[in-house]
Image: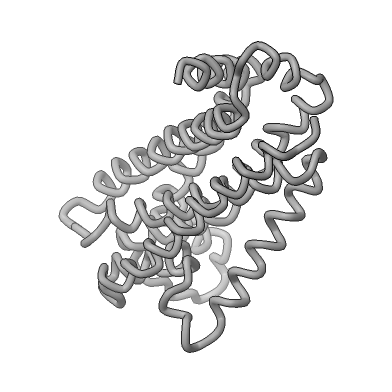
């Protein structure tokens, strides 16, 4: 446990010094600001640009702000998370620092779990900052428009992000190059997407956590429909981490 805490501290300091934490916070802050502002003022901007044309646009609502939030975060936001953390082990392989740490008594599971913990912590801080900013401006622009399951819908997307990081962690253990780890992640994510298209098991797919958030807010779907996908997602997270630990124990450094 002491080794785990020490490595977590080392990882946190490293992510601070290489500006990964700052980059994540800045990017997600921008996403948090863009979502409500885009929903609120884009119709006016389009109307101004098309002054010579007759365009009828619906009055923006609070759900439009959240639609922008989920669109920005689930596509650009989580993609940037994967790219930024794809080097979590490749740099250690190149420098040979892992061998030094292991000779000093640090366990291999501690390395994998501490790196994953810091990745999740940075992603979580950035994500919930983004959510808080969007929530605040949405409440300001659309006073009185309360939407159901706002936090639960955000939790579902956050959990999907944790799942993505667990798959990436497994890829980083399997492959020494960051680019190959990203390809592994894309392959697994594509497989999950294809399986999720099968009608009989579509309702169980983790894709629901990234695609039905706005439907949950608008009342088109219920919170109960997220339960099984959440359980499946948790199984994937635990399975990917367990596989990463086992494989890293056997890996030649």
Quarter of the figure that contains the N terminus:
top left
Asked if residue 147 can be seen in this view, the reply is yes
User: Which residue occupies the extreme bottom position in the image?
Assistant: 199
* Residue 111 in the image: above or below residue 240: above
Nearer-the-camera pick, 16 or 246: 246
In the visual, does 162 lie left or right of 81? left
Quadrant of the image containing the C terminus: top right
Residue in the picture at 56% in, 26% down:
21
Toward the left, the furthest residue is: 144
Q: Position of residue 226 (x, y in %)?
A: 34, 68
The residue drawn where x is 54% and y is 76% is: 196
Does residue 78 show up?
no
Relative image position of residue 102 (x, y in whole percent): 68, 19
User: Which residue lies at the image location 43% right of the left edge and 64% below the top edge?
Assistant: 232
- In the depicted structure, whether residue 77 falls above or below residue 124: below
Q: Nearer the viewer, residue 101 or 29?
A: 101
Give the tally of numbered discs.
Answer: 0
Q: Is residue 185 left or right of residue 138?
A: right
Rendered image quadrant of residue 252: top right
Q: Position of residue 182 (x, y in %)?
A: 73, 49
């Amino acid at each position: 446990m002491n080794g785990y805490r020490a490595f977590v501290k080392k990882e946190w300091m490293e992510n601070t010094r290489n500006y990964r934490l700052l980059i994540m916070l800045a990017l997600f802050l921008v996403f948090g600001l863009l979502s409500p502002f885009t929903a609120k003022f884009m119709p006016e901007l389009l109307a101004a640009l098309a002054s010579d044309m007759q365009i009828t646009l619906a009055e923006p609502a609070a759900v439009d702000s959240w639609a922008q939030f989920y669109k920005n975060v689930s596509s650009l936001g989580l993609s940037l998370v994967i790219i930024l953390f794809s080097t979590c082990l490749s740099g250690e392989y190149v420098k040979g620092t892992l061998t030094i740490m292991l000779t000093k008594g640090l366990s291999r599971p501690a390395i994998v779990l501490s790196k994953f913990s810091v990745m999740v912590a940075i992603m979580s801080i950035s994500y919930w900052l983004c959510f808080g900013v969007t929530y605040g401006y949405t409440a300001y622009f659309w006073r009185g428009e309360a939407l159901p399951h706002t936090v639960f819908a955000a939790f579902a997307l956050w959990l999907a992000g944790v799942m993505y990081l667990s798959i990436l962690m497994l890829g980083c253990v399997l492959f020494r190059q960051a680019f190959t780890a990203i390809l592994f992640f894309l392959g697994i994510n594509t497989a999950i997407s294809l399986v999720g298209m099968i009608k009989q098991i579509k309702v169980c797919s983790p894709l629901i956590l990234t695609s039905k958030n706005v439907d949950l807010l608008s009342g088109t779907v219920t919170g109960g429909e997220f339960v099984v996908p959440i359980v499946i997602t948790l199984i994937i997270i635990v399975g990917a981490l367990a596989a990463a630990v086992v494989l890293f124990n056997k890996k030649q450094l």
